């Protein structure tokens, strides 16, 4: 008889637990009688005033001065194998006749060389920058 009463008490407890859990919301979420944060639509009674926003006046005035502080002095040197008074074939990346023979003259800062085109229709000296050439070949 004792065993039967224990089983009946357990069954009644389980039935009561099932009955109560069926009424509880899924995930044990709290329910509120009025809408609030995270509940979807929130109704507002009265007026909403957003007229108290500050005025922002963002315009540029005066002259701009942009500088790089402590910039290193960068200089491109003429390749050390080039000699003044010698002829070289320079191959450039441009289309057409991209191999030009030059007689080199004086050097200037920034890697520029005074050069006279050889065998070309224009024989006027020009400034060239050997660092921009694809290849440079010495001519004997």
Image (tube, rainbow, N blue to C red):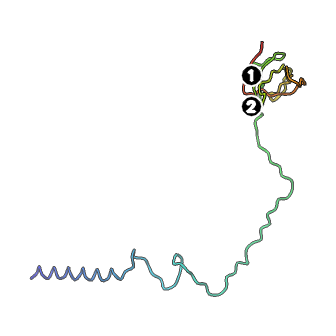
Report the number of numbered marks: 2
Quadrant of image for the N terminus? bottom left
Q: Nearer the viewer, residue 129 or 42?
A: 129
Helix, strand, or loop for circle 2?
loop
CB within 8 Å, label 2 to label 1:
no
Q: Is residue 16 left or right of 100 when viewed as pictured?
A: left
Q: Nearer the viewer, mark 2 or mark 1?
A: 2
Q: Nearer the viewer, residue 119 or 111?
A: 119
Taking the image as shown, residue 140 lies to the left or right of residue 4, namely right
Residue drawn at x 58%, y 84% as measured from the top left: 43
Q: Which mark is on residue 136? A: 1
N-term-proximal mark, 2 vs 1:
2
User: Where does residue 26 sit, x and y in percent of width and height?
Assistant: 39, 76
Q: Is residue 78 above or below residue 30?
A: above
**Is 19 displayed left or right of 107 in the figure?**
left
Q: Name the residue at the bottom extreme.
A: 46
Give the residue at mark 2: 93
Of 139 and 19, the residue lying toward us: 139
């Amino acid at each position: 008889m004792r065993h039967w009463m224990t089983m009946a008490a357990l069954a009644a407890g389980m039935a009561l637990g099932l009955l109560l859990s069926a009424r509880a919301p899924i995930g044990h979420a709290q329910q509120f009688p009025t809408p609030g944060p995270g509940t979807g639509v929130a109704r507002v009674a009265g007026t909403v005033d957003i007229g108290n926003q500050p005025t922002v006046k963002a315009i540029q005035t005066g002259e701009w001065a942009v500088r790089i502080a402590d910039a290193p002095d960068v200089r491109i040197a003429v390749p050390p194998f080039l000699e003044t008074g010698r002829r070289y074939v320079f191959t450039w990346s441009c289309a057409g006749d991209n191999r030009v023979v030059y007689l080199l003259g004086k050097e200037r800062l920034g890697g520029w060389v005074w050069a006279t085109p050889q065998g070309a229709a224009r024989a006027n000296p020009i400034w060239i920058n050997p660092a921009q050439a694809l290849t440079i070949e010495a001519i004997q």
